Image (tube, rainbow, N blue to C red):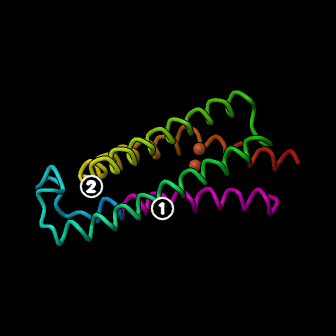
Amino acid sequence: MSPNQEESLTRIRRDHEHMLRLIERITGECDQVGVHENCNDCQPTRRHICHGNIEQLIRSFVEATLKHNFLESMLMEHYVPEAHRIAHNQAHLDIARQLKEIRVIFSEDGNCVLAIDGMEKIRQTLIDHFQHYDQHLEGYLKLAETRA
Ligand SMILES: [Fe+2]
Ligand SMILES: [Fe+2]
């Protein structure tokens, strides 16, 4: 496999791990899930700290995910059939929409409980996406190499 393709595959996998780790950190930030339905019911001292952490982590997660999807879209320009490219980019748009919803909900009422709910949903979306779309992309990258 050429250094380029190998590098792309490593990068894709490393990004995926990084994204899932960020989700893990965000959901792990609150130990009151299932106790309170709204951050306002939590102790102000605790709320202040985890709110700041979660906000920062969500920002990093959204940035990392959008950047990653952009990288994949760039790779698809060269190595995949059009049908896959269109469907895969469409799936990336759905992910972007979901990310935006999380940010909007969070910036409107700052309720981390809802944000964490949203993170659980996007975790499942991403796991499905890795399986149904990214695995195919990885296959095309490998195939492109054998043809080169
Ligand atoms: Fe993807
Ligand atoms: Fe991906």
Q: Position of residue 44 (x, y in %)?
A: 15, 67
Type of amino acid under label 1: Ser
Farthest residue toward the top?
Answer: 83
User: In the displayed structure, does residue 80 sit left or right of residue 32?
Assistant: right
Task: Tell me the amino acid under the disc marked 2.
Answer: Cys
| x then y, percent, for residue 109 | 27, 49
SS state under label 1: helix
**Circle 1 residues within 10 Å: few <14, some 14–19, many ≥20:** few
Under circle 2, the secondary element is: helix
Residue 41 against residue 92 in the figure, above or below = below
Query: Residue 65, percent across and down?
Result: 53, 53
What residue appears at the point 76 percent right and 56 percent down from the top-left corner? 5
Along the line of sight, the residue nearer the viewer: 130 or 33: 33
The mark found on residue 60 in the picture is 1
Is 68 placed left or right of 77 in the picture?
left
Magenta run includes residue 5: yes
Residue positioned 55% across, 36% down in the render: 93
Tell me if residue 60 is in the magenta stretch: no
**Corner quadrant of residue 51:** bottom left
Determine the image quadrant of residue 20: bottom left
Q: Which residues are magenta?
A: 1-24
For residue 21, which numbered disc appears in the image?
none
Residue in view at x 20 percent, y 65 percent? 47
Q: Earlier in the sequence, mark 2 or mark 1?
A: 1
Task: Give 68 or 146, whichever is nearer the viewer.
Answer: 68
The quadrant of the picture showing ligand 1 is top right
How far apart, in angstroms, are the residues tagged by discs 2 and 1? 16 Å
**Residue drawn at (77%, 44%) of the image:** 143
Q: Tell me if 31 is positioned left or right of 15 in this view.
A: left
Quarter the N terminus occupies: bottom right
The location of residue 127, given as percent across then percent down, is 45, 46
For residue 112, which numbered disc appears in the image?
Answer: 2
